[in-house]
Image (spheres, rainbow, N blue to C red):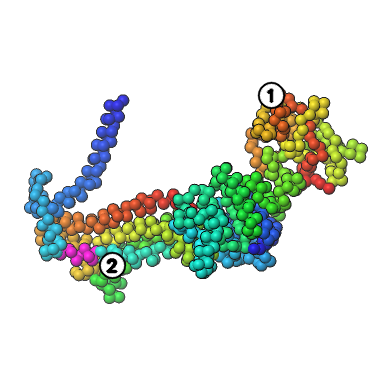
Amino acid sequence: MASMTFDGIGKTYPDGTVAVANVSFTVADGEFVVLVGPSGCGKSTLLRMAAGLELLNSGRLLMDDQDVTNTEPQDRDIAMVFQNYALYPHMTVYENMAFGLQQRKMPKDKIEKLVRDAAEMLDLTKYLHRKPGALSGGQRQRVAMGRAIVRHPMAFLMDEPLSNLDAKLRVQMRAELKLLNQRLGVTTLYVTHDQVEAMTMGDRVAVLKPVGNDGESNLQQIDTPQRLYDRPANLFVAGFIGSPAMNFVRAELQADGASLRATIAGTGITFPVPASAALSAYAGRQVIAGIRPEMFLVCSEAEALFNEPIPVAEALGADTFVFFDIASPPVTVSDAEEPEEFRRKGTNRLVARIPPVATPAPNQRLPLTVDLQKLHWFDPLTGAAIRD
Amino acid sequence: MARAKTFYTALTYAAGLLFLAIFIGPILWFLALAIRPAETAFAMPPQLTFEPTFDAFRHILVDPGTNAPQLVNSLIVAIGAVLLNLPFSVPAAYALSRFKMRGKKNIMLWYLGLLMAPPIAFLIPYFVLITRVGLQGSYLSMVLVLQTLTIPFSVWLMKSFIDEVPAELEEAARVDGARWYTIMWRITLPIVRPGIIVTSMFAFVFAWNNAAFPLVLSSRSTATLPIGTLGYFATSGVTWNYIAAAAVLAMIPPMIIFLVFDRYVVRGLTFGSVKG
């Protein structure tokens, strides 16, 4: 077991494409860290660098304070689970799991014991003499896990290991993987594009985005899932974490005596803002307000900040999501996964989570207010969160 | 509508039979030639019925049995060519498929060029070379020179098989602690075993059917079956039934091989469906 440190890691391909730039973070001994981000954000590249399968152009990679930047994958004591499992098709489950141990010249009886223990733990004992082709997707996934844990490596690297499973199995395996990690306490770096997986599994989650400008880092924020949700560092993280995504509106901030008032751009909607030192500095300027769907509250018409017709309501049973448009210029977060058709020109489609009893009839107006204490504020130029 | 359908089905079958006749007709005719009495070979009008006789086969295999040792020679040369071919072409294909190196494309094109060049072009230099080193008339000389054809072909074929093996499998093995030679030996080659079998089959058939190299390199005692067959043209009065019998004989080993390893050919050709 070991800690793993990425120190100013960068990777540029020969054609000039910057895949990874300036990434630094440390995975503590026994910690489960999830790398999450949209495609092209460099998360898989980082993982492959940790494995030694991909070379890096700049920075250092440390395992337990030992520089392994130029160490071959064979000589790093790590195990990797691949997205398509990469099981050796011509070997039985037993041989698949024993292969790594054989490479380490371990005596046969010890290999036998380790493989049987791992198979027991993963409920694979019945299948030890089958080949991967004769296994179901979930079983193959477990063999891939078994091949990793049987070696008792210093760290696990997992590249979207659940993405080939169907939804139900994925939820089940997610819990099993988390339990396994807690039981074994092995340092784990886990890549996924699924934020639910990231939030539920990671001790900490690193949010990455594709690099654009020079000197920018892929790494946007690394923190516990709850803190990522509660205190996103910038617009990208705020928009990426949470489903449905956080609503963004442009607002003009005005000083109002000792406090502040915000007016949503393009509308007459105005509301008092709980004053804070950081926000006061933006008085007289435009900022971006972030509203999570659950911050909306159904209220009387007199109290309403928003009172718009609801063209679309999605009833999920426990909650209902209602969508409505306000005549405010939309905020586009780079690489936000919002489809083009939702970005109406000059309007901004917002989504609110409301109790099912409050679900309005189609196109009926629904008076909504917002829990103003919880609003997030962002600098419109840098995208950074405005906080004290 | 049913009638139209029947008509088209009939037409399809007719076309199929026509093509079958074009392709298999000469073979059947040759087969018939081998077992019909010699004097009816070119009788006009052609005799469709005759008393089958195995005289020609008896002549070539038993009494005097000119071609029996040549059959053995052909087997020695073809099997030898396959055995010498694999240890060179398989690692070469692996390296060309997996390793980063300069001029990879040029090497592959050079191999292709070797395949396209007429064997006649190599005959004289090889003859001189083989004679100088004192190997003329030996099995080894033919086995060596046949590699000019079998290695390029096998490298191309094997490379395409190895290319199909997902890179993740080798990466998984690297992370598991295996060096490249272990990966090649224990992961990649076992997976491409159907490819190795198919490649060997083709190398065997190439070597088996080749007449140009043995023509100049073999001696009387090491002559292969195609040379023996050609020999009948030289004797006064071409003995068609002996030629036909020798040709039929020459067809049998490749046919047996394809029948036995048939499933590997199919698997080899649908290799892209290998999943990890």
> Dominant secondary structure of the magenta stretch?
helix
Q: Which residue is mark 2?
A: B142
Q: Magenta residues?
A: B66-74
Picture residue at 10% right of the left edge, 57% below the top: B55
**Image mark 2: chain:** B
Depicted A284 relative to depicted A74: above or below: above
Question: x, y (%) of residue A41?
Answer: 64, 50
Residue A110's x, y, as percent?
A: 53, 67
**A203 on left or right of B256:** right
- The quarter of the rendered structure image containing the N terminus of chain A is bottom right
How many neighbours does mark 1 have within 10 angstroms: few (below 14), some (14-19), or many (20 or more)? Answer: few
Instruction: Give the side of residue B91 with respect to residue A138, left or right.
Output: left
Judge the density around disc 2: few (<14), some (14-19), many (≥20) Cα neighbours within 10 Å. many
Foreground tag (2 vs 1): 1
Cα distance between the residues tagged 2 and 1: 89 Å
* Residue type, mark 1 in image: Ala
- Which residue corresponds to the image point at 60% horizontal and 62% vertical from the top-left? A153
Query: As drawn, is B43 to the left or to the right of B82?
Result: left
Of helix, strand and loop, which one carries label 1?
A: loop
Q: Which mark is residue A361?
A: 1
Q: Position of residue B29 (x, y in %)?
A: 17, 49
The residue closer to the viewer here, B35 or A162, is A162
- Can you tell which mark lies on residue A213? none
Q: Is A261 located above or below residue A164 in the figure?
A: above
Question: Disc 2 marks which amino acid?
Answer: Met
Res A97 visible: yes
